Amino acid sequence: MRNIGFTRLAIFRPGIIVGNAHTPAWVGLLGSLVPGPFGNIDQRILGRSIAAEIALHSREAGEVIRENAAMKQLAAQFNSVTLAFLREV
């Protein structure tokens, strides 16, 4: 990947993605009982964390692996940056 110009590799390892048409409601309920990186993550949080990774860290070099907790923190960080930007506009 570095040979074609990429300097950062971000791997997202979500648990059970909930909030979409492809995940039955009972799987979401079951996933809420699973602790740690294998539990639930909402599709909107997953999307925000991917957008935040691109917007906030794309110029950094290296590799990063993000599981549920790290994705939730990154999405929250992105939300606060977005809100601050919108207040300035």
Image (cartoon, helix red, strand yellow):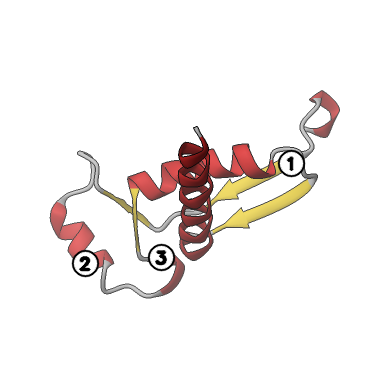
Q: In the image shown, does 82 or 71 lie closer to the viewer? A: 82
Residue in the picture at 68% in, 53% down: 64
Residue 36 location in percent, x, y?
Answer: 43, 73
Residue in the picture at 64% in, 43% down: 56
Determine which of the numbered discs, if any, sits on residue 39 in the image. none
Q: Tell me whether the residue at label 3 lies in contact with that at label 1, contact meaning CB atoms closer than 8 angstroms.
A: no
Q: CA distance from mark 2 to mark 1?
A: 34 Å
Q: Report helix, strand or loop for mark 3.
A: helix
Determine which of the numbered discs, if any, sits on residue 8 in the image. 1
| Mark 1 residue crowding within 10 angstroms, few (<14) / some (14–19) / many (20+) | some
First of labels 2, 1 by sequence position: 1
Q: Report helix, strand or loop for mark 2.
A: helix
Q: Which residue is mark 3?
A: 38
Res 14 → quadrant: bottom left
Q: Residue furthest front?
A: 88
Residue in the picture at 37% in, 75% down: 35
Determine which of the numbered discs, if any, sits on residue 30 in the image. 2
First of labels 3, 1 by sequence position: 1
Q: CA distance from mark 3 to mark 1?
A: 24 Å
